[in-house]
Image (spheres, helix red, strand yellow):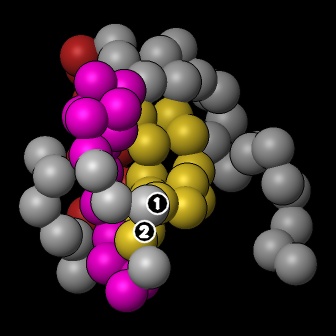
Amino acid sequence: MSEIWTDIVGAVEEGHFIQNTLGKTVYLACDMKQNLYVFTYEEFKAFKKKLKVIEIFHPGGRLNEHERLLSKHT
């Protein structure tokens, strides 16, 4: 799962799949070159590049996915 994603919607869907089906915490992150990644916690810890976390999908996350921590884009 440490491959680079070019499809943002696909990356989010992968995060939701891992979150809801596998019951794991998932990190949607990008590196300094703005490459997009989807990681489980174990993969995130092992990845050696500096990353910025964009979104965290916790197991059993919100039922209403449109109501995230940040309700509006800034």
Image quarter (top left, top right, bottom left or bottom right) of the C terminus:
bottom right
Q: Which of pointers 2 and 1 indicates the residue nearer the eye?
A: 1
Label 1 neighbour load within 10 Å: few <14, some 14-19, many 20+: some
Q: Is residue 52 above or below residue 48?
A: below
Residue at horizontal 24 percent and vertical 16 percent from the top: 22
Q: Name the element at disc 1.
A: strand
Crowding around mark 2 (Cα neighbors within 10 Å: few <14, some 14 to 19, many 20+) is: some
Label 2 or label 1, whichever comes before in sequence order: 2
Find residue 56 and report its horizontal and vertical position in percent. 55, 40
Identified by mark 1, the residue type is: Leu
Q: Residue at x 35, y 18 (%)?
A: 24
Q: Quadrant of residue 29?
A: bottom left
Residue type at mark 2: give it.
Answer: Cys
Q: Quadrant of residue 33?
A: bottom left
Magenta-drawn segment: 33-47
* Residues under numbered marks 2 and 1 in contact, where contact means CB atoms less than 8 Å apart: yes
Q: Residue at x 46, y 60 (%)?
A: 51
In this picture, residue 32 sits left or right of residue 2? right
Q: Position of residue 37 (x, y in %)?
A: 30, 60
Residue 4 part of the magenta-drawn span: no
Residue under pointer 1: 51
Q: Quadrant of residue 42?
A: top left
Q: Position of residue 32 (x, y in %)?
A: 44, 79
Instruction: Say which residue label 2 marks.
Output: 30
Horizontal and vertical percent position of residue 36: 33, 70
> Up-down: is 58 above or below 52?
above
Using the image, determine if residue 3 lies above or below residue 15. below
Q: Is residue 36 magenta?
A: yes
